[in-house]
Image (tube, helix red, strand yellow):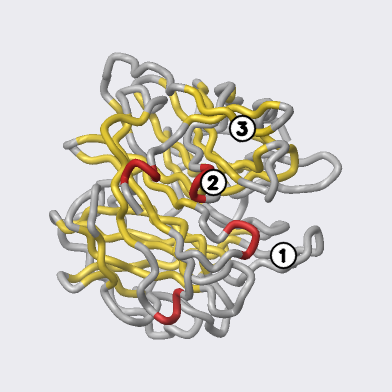
């Protein structure tokens, strides 16, 4: 594929289909603040290996299909975001907070109003990043009127990590020639801020290999700048034709990419790890085998993200694959496992979730 055919396009819906539009003009750059996991992993983070690798995870919370988990820490609280909760009264972007991991505040909707292009009840894979004094929430949603059903990435702004966020009117990233775009994730270091995502070539069950991408972000997080870079595609048997859900971390100058491979509703779904030359790639697998595959805690784990603070580094993920057809979804609680790094790459480590934080008062919203 040539670069001309994979340019990131802004799209709007119309009654008869899609129309391409020019992107929003970049705002003046200002200082950005990332999730604590993005570039804060210590140069030496080598806890003991997990003595029980067949059951490495600790259940963080229970709930209905809490897939695509991502953790954010600010002002003495942890905020846990997951994919949307479908139903007659859907929760678009669920978020709950805690000062420990045994008791959580109520789940609220960080994005109570979807943009006009998004179909209610079909939102996935949120991510959050702080820019200046505000926050940008990125999310995946089903594009109204698309045939076959196509997903695109949206963005929304807010003053607090739990929202409420207000969505921009148009999709932030959508590649209709490649089946759409999903799984946004931000990476930031001293050199800049980047958006990672997946182009959805497997739309409608297609066997076309998918691609994971990266592109630099403007100072306010609301524009892509420069050109898109292809990070990697599937090249190992266990991946099939699908790789997705990228999350990039930097450890002592080395770049490690966590991702999921194969179909999300199959036992073969698993988490992979790759080493990248930098935020723009290229990336190559650290092993011909998955980093985390089906185990005693569930078949088909995936949709991982990485969180780090001064106490260590953890990977959050869904312990088992999704079930089709909807809405008969089994409970998939968020699972967390500690990880460590050597020069050869990441490994499953011993230890439970991050330590509890000193309580700073009641939850940020009423029960």
Q: Secondary structure at mark 3?
A: strand
Residue at image x 37%, y 16%? 25
How far is the residue under mark 1 from the one under mark 3? 35 Å
Do tag 3 and tag 2 residues touch (Cβ < 8 Å)?
no
Q: Is residue 320 above or below residue 69?
A: below
Mark number displayed over residue 180: 2
Give the side of residue 16 with respect to residue 126, left or right: right
Q: Earlier in the sequence, mark 1 or mark 3?
A: 3
Disc 3 target residue: 18
Q: Where in the figure is residue 48, as x and y percent of width and height?
A: 28, 77
How far is the residue under mark 1 from the one under mark 2? 27 Å
Q: Nearer the viewer, residue 340 or 112?
A: 112
Q: Where in the figure is residue 340, as x and y percent of width and height?
A: 28, 68
How far is the residue under mark 3 from the one under mark 2? 12 Å
Q: Is residue 270 above or below residue 229?
A: below
Q: Where in the figure is residue 103, as x and y percent of width and height?
A: 62, 52
Q: Earlier in the sequence, mark 3 or mark 2?
A: 3
Mark number displayed over residue 331: 1
């Amino acid at each position: 594929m040539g670069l001309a055919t994979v340019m990131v396009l802004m799209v709007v819906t119309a009654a008869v289909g899609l129309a391409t539009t020019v992107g929003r003009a970049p705002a003046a750059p200002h200082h950005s603040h990332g999730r604590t996991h993005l570039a804060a992993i210590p140069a030496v983070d080598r806890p003991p290996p997990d003595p029980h690798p067949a059951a490495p995870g600790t259940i963080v919370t229970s709930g209905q299909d809490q897939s695509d988990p991502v953790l954010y820490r600010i002002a003495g609280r942890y905020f846990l975001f997951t994919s949307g909760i479908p139903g007659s009264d859907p929760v678009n972007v669920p978020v709950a907070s805690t000062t420990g991991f045994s008791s959580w505040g109520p789940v609220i909707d960080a994005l109570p109003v979807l943009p006009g292009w998004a179909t209610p009840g079909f939102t996935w894979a949120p991510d959050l990043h702080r820019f200046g004094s505000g926050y940008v929430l990125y999310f995946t949603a089903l594009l109204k009127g698309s045939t076959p059903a196509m997903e695109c990435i949206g963005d929304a702004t807010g003053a607090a990590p739990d929202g409420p966020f207000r969505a921009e009117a148009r999709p932030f990233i959508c590649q209709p020639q490649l089946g759409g775009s999903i799984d946004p994730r931000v990476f930031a270091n001293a050199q800049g801020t980047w958006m990672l995502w997946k182009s959805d070539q497997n739309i409608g069950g297609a066997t076309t290999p998918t691609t994971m991408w990266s592109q630099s972000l403007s100072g306010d997080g609301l524009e892509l700048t420069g050109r898109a870079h292809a990070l990697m595609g599937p090249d190992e048997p266990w991946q099939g034709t699908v790789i997705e859900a990228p999350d990039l971390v930097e450890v002592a100058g080395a770049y490690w990419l966590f991702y999921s491979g194969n179909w999300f509703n199959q036992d073969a779904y698993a988490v992979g790890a790759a080493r990248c030359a930098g935020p723009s790639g290229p990336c190559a697998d650290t092993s011909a085998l998955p980093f985390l595959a089906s185990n005693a805690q569930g078949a088909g784990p995936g949709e991982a993200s990485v969180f780090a603070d001064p106490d260590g580094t953890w990977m959050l993920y869904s312990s088992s694959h999704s079930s089709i057809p909807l809405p008969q979804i089994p409970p998939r609680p968020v699972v967390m496992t500690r990880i460590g790094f050597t020069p050869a790459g990441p490994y499953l480590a011993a230890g439970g979730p991050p330590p509890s934080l000193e309580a700073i008062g009641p939850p940020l919203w009423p029960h």
